[in-house]
Amino acid sequence: MSSLKLFWSYMKGNRLLYIGALVSVALATFFSILNPLVLRVTIDSIIGDKPLDLPRLIGEVIKGFGGKEVLEQNLWVAGVIMVGLTLLQGIFLYFKGKWSAIAAESIAKNTRERLYDHLQHLPYEYHTKAETGDLIQRCTSDVDTVRRFLAVQFVEVGRAIFMMTFVAIIMFSLDMRLTLVAIGVVPIILAFSYFFYKEVKKSFKDADEAEGRMSTVLQENLTGVRVVRAFARQNYEIDKFDKESSGYRAKCYRVLRLLAWFWSVSDFLCMLQIGIVLIFGSYWAFEGSITLGTLVVFVTYEGMLLWPVRQLGRILTDMGKTLVALGRIQEVLDEVREEENDSDFKPALRGNIKFEKVYFEYEEGKGVLKDISFEVNEGETIAILGATGSGKSSLVHLLARLYDYQQGSIKIDGYEIKDINKKWLRRHIGLVLQEPFLFAKSVKENIGLARSDVRDTEIFEAANNAAIHDVILDFEKGYDTIVGERGVSLSGGQKQRVAIARTLIRECPILIFDDSLSAVDTETDATIRQELKKKKENTTTFIISHRINTLAEADKILVIDDGKIVEAGTHQDLINKEGMYKRVWEIQNSLEQEMEVG
Amino acid sequence: MAEFREQDYNKEFDFGLWKKLIHYLKPLKKEVLILAIVMIGVGGIDAIFPLMTKYAVDKFVVASNIDGLLKFSLAYGVLVIVQAINVWLLIDYAGRIETTMSYDIRKAGFQRLQELSFSYYDKTAVGWLMARMTSDVKRLGEVISWGFVDSVWGMTMMLTTMVIMFYLNWKLALITLSVVPVLAVLSIYFQKKILKAYRKVRKINSTITGAFNEGIMGAKTTKTLVREEENLKEFEAKTAKMRESSVKAAIFSALYLPVVLTLGSIGTSFALVFGGKDVLLTTISYGTLVAFISYTVHFFEPISQLARVFAELQSAQASAERTMSMIETEPDIQDTQDVVEIYGDIFNPKSENWEELKGDITFKNVSFAYEDGERILEDFNLEIKAGETIALVGETGSGKSTLVNLACRFYEPIAGEILIDGVDYKRRSQLWLHSNIGYVLQTPHLFSGTIKENIRYGNLEASDLDIIRAAKLVNAHQLIKKLEQGYDTKIGEGGGSLSTGEKQLISFARAVLADPKIFVLDEATSSIDTEMEQIIQEAIDKLLKGRTNFIIAHRLSTIRSADRILVLRDGEIIEAGNHQELLRTKGYYYKLYTNQFMKEEIV
């Protein structure tokens, strides 16, 4: 029962509230059970003529009121007692509701925050493969399933147990034989519920997965709407969606079908049980072995007893759902965070970098980078050229420890980067990704994102350096324009420039442009590089690009092919050597020749 | 492009809206009818059970006579069996209604989403649409089917109980039921409060979903910016707000039940006190009192059920409004009735009537502005011959993409007209034009599935051989072959496991396979390395023959071979001509071109 342990661990910090809620529910149940007894005494002994065969205490209470005769004339006393008992029951029910809500909401809050935090700290690799839609479902609807169970159902278990206990005790005290008849079906229903819960669990999971598939098709259709339209694939998409949507419908219906069996069978058992009590009870009452009042109480209590038992079945199925949801949440939380086993070493970093025989692979046996060795001094610019998939992005990702290399060593200022605290390292590296993400905030906030103490003038300066300042001012709301998914959609080039601006503002000793000017036109590209040149003095800069004139001005150029450095040197060195650089240069240069002819 | 805003919706119960939803129940008439009958049965039998008890007590115990006990047992057994079957039917049929209705609404929604224009997508977040299509629809299905179940049951139960009570003793019935109006008023009051509180909760919830979306999509960027702590702090502020408002809502709900219980017990007490007196005065029988009291208990449950159903309906109203407003949105770009008659719509294209597209494109006095935006094009004229390759050059925002979007009829001009093969394209169906377009985007979008499936998207009838041929043409073949499972390699959502360059190559192969008459390359090669681009360039040159082509590329090597280069600035063509001609004029293009080879920057 490790799943129960899991529940228990989620309740941490809120267990006291749950105990409070359980006590409240016990008291509420207790008061609700007293009511039929009051009714019975009133009917049997005050209105009717039965002798009071009651515990002494209640007999004393009745005497205190003046005995049967006075009460007979003042029936309102019984009425007031009943209302009073219900009021007490209500008050405790209120506390139960309140406390379990607070507890459940707190647990949900913690879980959400844990998930959010955890996701942010999962390795880079996880995020390149993650399915956003599925993860969001886990973080939202799965958390909500757990929350609902903890807010409503969980305490209901306690209520059912208390109810059964109290009722069973009272029944036993009234008539042993009839009690045995009355609770005969309980174990059967419980066993049936358990069996059913096992069955339905799988169906719930199937339905969840079917929903996930449907959501994926939907999400891809919506984000790829341009592709769908450009290929006029609307009908194809409709069929695709219809397939998943009807699959989801079938799975949902199957779950409901199972529920139909569960409810009809358990209802059948319960109603049958009440019937049996009524029939046996009537017969025994006719025989004279029990009183009429006892029969009435039994019939009333039977309903009270079976209701929570039936409810247990439902709770159990909900628990099945909840455990599935919990499992899906736990799956995310069980992913290993990247800072696990991270060091606390935080040396001062200036930007002397040394790669030595670095080997790196994503999958075993498939080296992406092999035997990479080179050195960069503080303040130098290093340019990287390579074919698609040659490993150039991987190389700079290693430097920021978005991935860890398997062999060799990478040192910054003599410190092996694996020994340096990851966040500390990344604070010193401004990496502009190929496809940067903008947050749903204003442009200003997006640029100032990485520093809390940033001044407006600094933001404007960074934007200026990234050649985006004028573009931003052209927006209707200028720097307050909201970007990101819910805001104005920027072009690829504009996004890249905002990303560059927000990286520049961090003033890192090491800057990396991972082909991050690809969507910017050449003129802007040149402007940005000029600005950078003016600004940086001690900044070590990595530039990945396909544009020769972007690469040419670097202090050192690396040409990477199939994970190896095949050429290295300055622009002059490389154009005098046969190789890829020269070929690319010639291709781009031929344009120039042609221009001069023209 | 309007900023996205969460709309505020009607607070009052909107009958018109629900009527529209009921429309989705029409194909389910039979199921609804059966369900209604079943529910009346369930409610009726539930109301009869206490009568059975009364009968047993009065007939067998009080009268001391067990003749007929067997018959009674049989009757009871039959009732139990009938009720069990009823329960089975009720869930089965409610389930059918729920799932079918959700399915139908989703289908209608999805179809509409396929028709809506890009202007709609520009101002609507994908997450918002996702929520409408998944959770909102689910909720509607649940609320309508189970709400129906509960209300039919509740009303039957109440009516039957009331009839029996009045039949047993109308005076006592009146006294007992005197609490009902109070209960009804309080119920509505509470449910409205609860509803309002939960509405707030859901609003906050959607911001949390948004935050998760951003947290996950932006995780990589967050890492490079080392911003994990700040993000978490911002997120915590949201969850704290969520907890606060959820607890508030839960407390309202927790208050409601005790109120119902207490009022119910007041009713029961009335029955006991006044009924008791009557027994003492021997105006009613003992069994009647017992039955009466158990009926008062029975009576209050359906009231709170009904109040709950009403509240849920009202709270689902926001879901209903949002979903229906989405389904009812009219696409900005629509084919006219006449066009649909001849050429069919997107669901039933009459492709046999489609004219062959040659590829002449004419912009005639075209003006265009995005919604709420300034004019991008003003009185724009341009003539493109079939088979011509047009390269578009200009700064970001100069109108390059707009031009192409208009030519492809992803947007329509607000004034003037665009002719294709000499005919205003509004007189042809959209699908006709789109079926003839090939498009490669700057950020290529791939679907989850295999590489093969993704390429086949360009032409669903293509054989494996065709696919390989297309891949070879754009030099994607070798790259794909290198992957472990080759063409059957699964790619994740959005092509996660591939680099941008690889994705572009695949999307290129996809476009090639479509064999379109009009070809658009939107900065498609910016992330493919120069060497590979060179190879692709040759393939493109071959490919462009016989088609009308638009090329938007920043790197001039791609543009050189174009028949005509248009230099755009602020929506105007400032230079036009082929490569040589434009270099000779030494204008903007010349500057742009030489810029790429700024000699002074080469060390």
Image: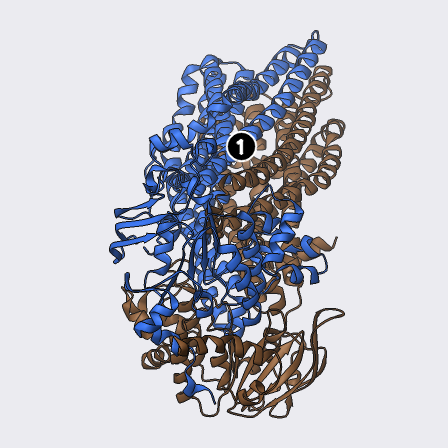
Chain colours: A brown, B blue
Q: Who is closer to the viewer here, A357 or B245?
A: A357
Q: Who is closer to the viewer here, B167 or B110?
A: B110
> If the image is split into quadrants, where does the C terminus of chain A sit?
bottom left
So how many labels did they put on this image? 1
Position of A514 compared to B563: left or right? right
- In which image quadrant can residue A180 be found? top right
- Amino acid at dot 1: Glu
Measuring from the top left, give residue A518's x and y in whole percent: 47, 71
Which element type, helix, strand or loop, lies under badge 1?
helix
Give the vertical position of B160 relative to A124 (above or below).
above
Q: Residue at x 67, y 33 (%)?
A: A258
Circle 1 chain: B
- In which image quadrant can residue A168 be found? top right
Residue that label 1 marks: B98
Measuring from the top left, give residue A450's x and y in whole percent: 45, 76
Residue lying farthest top? B67
Position of B272 compared to A399: left or right? left
| Whether residue B292 can be seen here | yes
Measuring from the top left, give residue A528's x and y in whole percent: 40, 79
Give the vertical position of A92 relative to A83 (above or below).
below
Give the vertical position of A172 relative to B58 (above or below).
below
Q: Who is closer to the viewer here, B112 or A159?
A: B112
